[in-house]
Image (cartoon, helix red, strand yellow):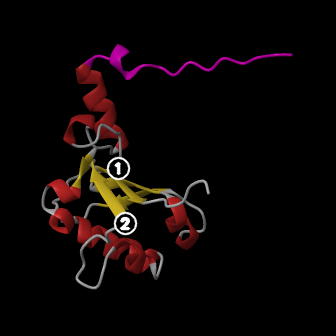
Amino acid sequence: MVYHLFLPVSVNLIPQVEKEQISRELGMAHADRGGGHDLPLNSVLVHLSGHLSDYTNKKRDFTLKTTPTVVDLVYSLNEMFPGIRDRILDDHDRPREYVNIFVNGQNVRDGDAERTRLKDGDEIYILPSIAGGLK
């Protein structure tokens, strides 16, 4: 049996000046601007889970153009995947009771909820609750 070991190159080994130059050349957002990911400029990283992937052909991770707020982001998702908005937001554009939305690890319910401002490089998780258990 043969095992292959893949070791990622640590970006911490690259001097900061080189990191910034490489980011500019590749058109990537600087990691300090948002969720810590190298993303194309003017974009955010969105992760969906649970039944929401039924609306996205099972795709769960997206890089999307940055929108001003969380509610605008959901409307952008709905343009791509009609019907997904109704699974995330209620009739008043507030997150449904059973859906949690996190921006850079912070639950939007603890702040401005659907009006939470987004910026380039943010990482958004949209997580519907899971119900059930043993009988």
- Locate residue 124 relative to residue 135 in the image: left or right: left
Quarter holding the N terminus is top right
Q: Main secondary structure of the magenta part?
A: loop
6 falls in the magenta region: yes
Q: Nearer the viewer, residue 132 or 62?
A: 132
* Residue 111 in the image, given as x and y percentages of width and height: 13, 56
**What number is the disc on residue 98?**
2
Residue at 28 percent across and 39 percent down: it is 24
Q: Residues within 10 Å of mark 2 (few under 14, many from 20)?
A: few
Residue pointed to by mark 1:
40
In the picture, residue 112 is in which quadrant? bottom left
- Quarter of the C terminus within the rendering: bottom right
What residue is rendered at 37% in x and 61% in y?
Answer: 64
Residue 134 in the image: state x and y as whole percent: 60, 53
Magenta region, residue range:
1-15
83 relative to 65, above or below:
below
Query: Which quadrant of the structure image shows residue 18?
Result: top left
Residue 9 placement (x, y as % from top left): 48, 20
Q: Is residue 74 above or below residue 130?
A: below
SS at circle 2: loop
Task: Please name whichever residue, 109 or 14, is drawn nearer the observer in this view of the structure.
Answer: 109
Label 1 to label 2, Cα distance in Å? 31 Å
Furthest toward the right, the residue is: 1
Q: Total label count? A: 2
| Above or below, comparing residue 6 to residue 131 in the picture | above
Nearer-the-camera pick, 91 or 31? 91
Q: Earlier in the sequence, mark 1 or mark 2?
A: 1
Image-quadrant location for residue 105? top left
In the current view of this chain or complex, which residue is farthest to the left? Answer: 112
For disc 1, the neighbor class at 10 Å (few under 14, some 14 to 19, many from 20) is: some
User: Is mark 1 in CB contact (under 8 Å) with mark 2?
Assistant: no
What element does badge 1 sit on?
Answer: loop
